Amino acid sequence: MAEAKQEGITVRKSENFDEWYTQVILKSELADYSPVSGCIVFRPSGYAIWEAIQRETDKEFKKIGIQNTYFPIFIPERLLKKEQEHVKGFSPEVAWVTQAGDSKLEERLAIRPTSETLMYEVISRWVRSSRDLPLRLNQWNNVVRWEFRHPTPLLRSREFLWNEGHTVFATEGEAMAERDEILRIYKTITEEYLALPGLVGKKTDAEKFAGATASYSIEHLMPDGKAIQGPDFHSDGQNFAKAFEISFVDRNGQKQFAWQNTWAISTREIGVMLAIHSDDKGLIVPPRVALFQVVIVPIFDEEARERVLKQAEKLRARLEETTSVKLDDRDHLTPGRKFNEWELKGVPLRVEIGARDLAKRQVVLARRDNGKKRQVTMASAAREVARELKEIQENLYQRALSFLKEHTYTAETYEQLKSSLKNGGIVRAPWCLSPDCEAKVKEETGAKIVNLPMDQKGTKSRCVYCGREAGVIANFAKSY
Amino acid sequence: MAEAKQEGITVRKSENFDEWYTQVILKSELADYSPVSGCIVFRPSGYAIWEAIQRETDKEFKKIGIQNTYFPIFIPERLLKKEQEHVKGFSPEVAWVTQAGDSKLEERLAIRPTSETLMYEVISRWVRSSRDLPLRLNQWNNVVRWEFRHPTPLLRSREFLWNEGHTVFATEGEAMAERDEILRIYKTITEEYLALPGLVGKKTDAEKFAGATASYSIEHLMPDGKAIQGPDFHSDGQNFAKAFEISFVDRNGQKQFAWQNTWAISTREIGVMLAIHSDDKGLIVPPRVALFQVVIVPIFDEEARERVLKQAEKLRARLEETTSVKLDDRDHLTPGRKFNEWELKGVPLRVEIGARDLAKRQVVLARRDNGKKRQVTMASAAREVARELKEIQENLYQRALSFLKEHTYTAETYEQLKSSLKNGGIVRAPWCLSPDCEAKVKEETGAKIVNLPMDQKGTKSRCVYCGREAGVIANFAKSY
């Protein structure tokens, strides 16, 4: 039987994480490099994960009254400059269109790095009275941030896909109430679909979004011990409303500026998911976002071929009613090669069905997450497959949660902080809220405050850096 | 009762089509202008139509084995130039990125006007053996064509949304078989969802896609008598495969180039839908693609307010099980104003419920397509609403089909052709297949061959221009 050379992962996750990460992406066929440096191609199994994230997130958005829109990808330079902090944050990495056909454009057009400035210019025309509010808009689109640092596929790509929610309220209270709604949705998607635990918290002023008054994030912990920012939520206060004249006349005839929020989840999440769950055999995808949840691999010699394939096809049809299933009936590969290939590609559950199984009216289920195999009767196969998928989903989450817990430390002194940070992970330590202490820690340890936990109960401890009274507990970590 | 000034459509469709078209788009709040000339904003009711088109089309694509992907938006200049015909067709309207941050790029990057060149460069790495085929990929994305002609919202926008299907086959036969599958899907979506009839046919060589060996299209007839191209399908033959080295080794050890197709449906279809169905009161949206299929307008004085609203809410909850429904319970607008607003916005069916209706246990259904009103019992409301929506969907299609039939003429002589073309519409006339005759007709009448009907049965007539033996019947029309 002739088999094409197919290479598995050649390095260990624990020994060379960066190389392992790249190999898993490419060899699992999740994504590929493109001819444009820093931009990747989402292959079908990778894009299917994004479709699952989109579908489930969008469903939740719609339930709370968010409406989808689409705004142009171009932002005229003069608009990008309208909010000072914002343009300062983004202009170093803007890709500029300067020509169309043979003509030089009169004004440069930015490819959106994010759409605040363009959207708010338009929205300001739509808001006249408090009856026009709230306006809760979202778009699923592509954005470009021309990073000059070393790009990493999915984690730091020059073009990426995301949702950008942009909402406008008459009062600060309504705007603030949305924060919990959106963070809850992002938490559900990351935990229950991507099986990714995270630390929800508030960003420090130094780390907040360019133009926002407060930023919130879900931070994940990567296997290399560095934190990475997941979905985020920004309270814009009235900053953009003032720059773009988004205002209305209230009941007393007074002009009021609106209160705004923005929020996003991006394809970076796929990279985080891959990094956290996968292993030395390749990709592991949580069942709820996998293109194929189950692969059926028939095992036969020439004599049993027809019989086995017939049963395998029957089983496929039955499983397809409730799961996404692939029957691998290719003739030119041995079952062993198929096992390796689908393990590399991260399909959560393999069903093996052979001539001997037929005789015993059973099949074998093999889990991708822990490698465990067991026999189940043919009659119970659909039920058992559903149960295993549920358990795999849960196990992946619990495994990631354990890793996060095991690598979350507390420190009361600077020595403790420095020592804990050496091993990677999150270190919870008291902080006096001074930007100076935050900056010094970053300078001296390379770790920053990734966020401040939401449930601050007050602390009697003293700032881990300066020893003054501490205002809060902060999550310190080295980060992406 | 204070009411904000809200303006209806101020011109007649039959008298000033262009102005009417723009007013309907803007005043129905389907779309809006943006600060970038030629690019529009899809507002929620407009984007919802695109979501419906995407959802239904994508479902059909997946059924026949198409897989979704995402490729970068940028195409390096050297790649765009790899296929001669292709670059000639697109380069005059390419938007170029030349700078990132403060740096000048070493090579200009085209914003994709279509993705053949970028995708095929990558795909060539994926295809080694016939076992890698077929490869049937699709992406839903944004593209930019910097038209210098007068842009028209939705019909000719500089940025638009579409699907681009790109498929690769080992044999010409398989590639050709896909044509009918895809055209059938596009026909279903345009006819059964957008209620738009169309003429399916083959493009002439002069009108085919840049780089294709044959193009096929669905052509719609606009109310102003001009044809407009809807979804299309292109047989690329081996043109791109040769330029991009997409090849494999066959069973005899011979190198073979692959056979490729590309196909698309775009947001232009929303503009066509609007133009064909809407009327002097504003937008009309077919139920199957409408954001809201039904609006409930309660009618009450102060005394009956509570009672009526309670019943209206009950009805809303009931209808919501099977339809997409909006209850307009705003206090500051009269029912009459609400009627006008929802008619302007094109909601297919209005349900009126007032105090007197309550007493009689009935509601009133008012159709947007023909203005007819009828009373139905409260108990039968859900069933009757479903029936009306089905009839509205069908009526819109039949109305458009009648318009197309009434404006489709046949001509045997050049005089007949010219005379028929004066009134607008499609003229079916014999053609000898000579590009010269085609060019002369275009020059002298302003009409081109929009396509050649698929079901050519052979004709004994003579070419409408030169009088030689005719090879085919062609659809002539002035067009967008």
Image (tube, coloured by chain):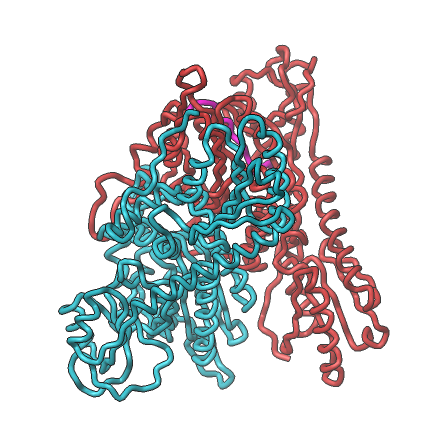
Chain colours: A red, B cyan
Q: Which residues are magenta?
A: A226-239
Farthest residue in the right direction? A360
Q: Position of residue B351 (x, y in %)?
A: 53, 44
Q: Nearer the viewer, residue A390 or B356?
A: B356
Q: Position of residue B140 (x, y in %)?
A: 46, 55
Which residue is rendered at x = 22% and y = 82% of the image? Answer: B432
Task: Tell me the chief SS of the magenta region.
Answer: strand
Q: Position of residue B398 (x, y in %)?
A: 42, 64
Asked if one can make out residue A445 in the rendered structure from this viewpoint, the answer is no
Q: Is residue B387 magenta?
A: no
Q: Nearer the viewer, residue B293 or A175?
A: B293
Q: Please give left or right for residue B452 compared with residue A457 in the image.
A: left
Q: Nearer the viewer, residue B238 or B460?
A: B460
Q: Where B212 falls versus B301 (above or below)?
A: below
Farthest residue in the left direction? B444
Where residue A129 sits, quadrant-wise, is: top left
Which quarter shows the C terminus of chain B? bottom left
Where residue A230 sits, quadrant-wise, is: top right
Q: Please give left or right for residue A440 compared with residue A397 in the image.
A: left
Which residue is rendered at x = 33% and y = 30% of the image? Answer: A81
Q: Position of residue B268 (x, y in %)?
A: 36, 55
Q: Where A230 falls versus B389 (above or below)?
A: above
Which residue is rendered at x = 44% and y = 40% of the image? Answer: B339
Which residue is rendered at x = 34% and y = 36% of the image? Answer: B7
Q: Where B263 falls versus B5 (above or below)?
A: below
